[in-house]
Image (cartoon, helix red, strand yellow):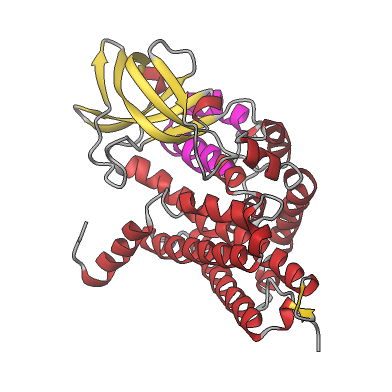
């Protein structure tokens, strides 16, 4: 009987096309050889490894699902596999790619003019222009409709005032996709670094996503030309459409974090000897490892089917909510349990679990909290909005 892959007991990989397998293997090598050696120190020192950006761009990982404009034009499952492997390295690495691809390049591609696409997308795919996404506000959180940032027409320009909070890539971004309330509804604007009155302030003291840049954005009478407005969408469906794209990637990412934790703890329990035998020989340990495998397998199948629905044009936002809720909760629970199995050693960045555990505390909150996604499914079942 053939030996099964302990992190893929249902051989989900066999359901991937040759191209999808090749993409996963390519990103996995990049993570193993280039990212993983850097991530413990990056997390410890709260620094994003900027040197990886050109390499990610060279591999076609930025805006990978976009056709043309220097982008790879990959399918949704391939993008999911990219997210899974990047987050196996660190959630901060996947967050960077997710924001660049789904929250910044996607709205320019989906809602922008041809001139805007030509101006920004090729350089963003090449990693020469970095973006951030300004939707969340200090008082808003899970209620984006409670937006205070405003944009008012002034001749051929717009004047933007307000602030955004918890913005990934904020202080390394060259442009910001900012959503603001106007007299005509909520609209998106591309703000450029150096515009008068536009300031990013990095948030320090984080205990999660330390290898990621997180900022507040502040707008004090920022003058933005009409040419920088995304004209092809109005209302919350614009930013929410971007979030659906990003959340889809997040359903895959935590699978990678969970696999990293499980792989490490399987090796650890085989080597660690207590009371005269390997820790792995204990029933309690085997039951815990088996439960991790069960939950990872469930998440893999959930995200793969979601990806096939996405590629068939049949994916619904509520389905993304279900997968995001299930898969991030799965990964966080596994990371916490792996940290416990590692004992005292588990609290250092020498091991993966504590880093993934702390990162996932943010992942379970951003792009819709666990409670929000539960209520999305509740609304789907009952037809009643309980928000």
Q: Above or below — where is 273 with respect to 184?
A: below
Q: Position of residue 386 (x, y in %)?
A: 20, 61
- Magenta-colored stretch includes residue 129: no
Q: Above or below — where is 58 with respect to 328?
A: above
Q: What stretch is highlighted in magenta?
A: 97-124
Asked if residue 75 can be seen in this view, the reply is: no
Which of these two is toward me, 335 or 57? 335
Which of these two is toward me, 315 or 383? 383
- Magenta-colored stretch includes residue 118: yes
- Quadrant in the rendering for residue 180: top left
Give the residue displayed 71% in from the left and 54% down from the top.
23
Location of the N terminus by quadrant is bottom right
Give the residue displayed 35% in from the left and 15% down from the top.
222
- Quadrant in the rendering for residue 39: top right
Give the residue displayed 45% in from the left and 66% down from the top.
326
Task: Name the dominant secondary structure of the magenta segment.
Answer: helix
């Amino acid at each position: 009987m053939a030996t099964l892959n302990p992190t893929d007991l249902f051989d989900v990989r066999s359901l991937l096309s040759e191209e999808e397998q090749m993409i996963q293997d390519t990103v996995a090598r990049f993570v193993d050889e280039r990212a993983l050696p850097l991530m413990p120190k990056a997390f410890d020192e709260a620094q994003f490894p900027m040197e990886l950006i050109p390499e990610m761009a060279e591999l076609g990982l930025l805006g990978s699902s976009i056709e043309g404009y220097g982008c790879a034009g990959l399918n949704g499952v391939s993008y999911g596999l990219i997210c899974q492997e990047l987050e196996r390295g660190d959630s901060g690495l996947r967050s960077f790619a997710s924001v660049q691809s789904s929250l910044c390049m996607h709205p320019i591609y989906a809602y922008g003019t041809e001139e805007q696409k030509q101006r920004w997308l090729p350089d963003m795919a090449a990693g020469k222009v970095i973006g951030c996404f300004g939707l969340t506000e200090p008082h808003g959180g899970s209620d984006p409709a409670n937006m205070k940032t405003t944009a008012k027409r002034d001749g051929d320009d717009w004047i933007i005032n307000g602030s955004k909070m918890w913005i990934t890539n904020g202080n390394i971004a060259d442009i910001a996709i900012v959503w603001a309330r106007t007299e005509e509804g909520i609209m998106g604007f591309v703000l450029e670094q150096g515009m008068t009155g536009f300031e990013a302030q990095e948030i320090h003291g984080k205990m999660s996503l330390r290898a990621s840049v997180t900022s507040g954005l502040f707008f004090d009478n920022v003058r933005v030309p009409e040419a920088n407005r995304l004209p092809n969408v109005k209302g919350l469906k614009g930013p929410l459409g971007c979030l659906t794209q990003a959340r889809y990637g997040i359903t895959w990412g935590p699978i990678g974090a969970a696999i990293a934790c499980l792989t490490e703890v399987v090796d650890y329990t085989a080597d660690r000897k207590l009371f005269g035998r390997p820790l792995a020989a204990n029933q309690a340990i085997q039951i815990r490892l088996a439960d991790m495998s069960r939950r990872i397998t469930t998440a893999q199948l959930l995200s793969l089917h979601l990806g096939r629905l996405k590629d068939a044009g049949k994916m619904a936002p509520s389905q993304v909510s279900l997968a995001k809720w299930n898969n991030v909760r799965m990964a966080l629970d596994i990371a916490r349990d792996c940290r416990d199995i590692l004992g005292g050693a588990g609290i250092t960045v020498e091991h993966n679990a504590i880093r993934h555990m702390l990162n996932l505390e943010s992942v379970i909150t951003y792009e819709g909290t666990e409670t929000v996604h539960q209520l999305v499914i509740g609304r789907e079942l009952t037809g009643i909005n309980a928000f």
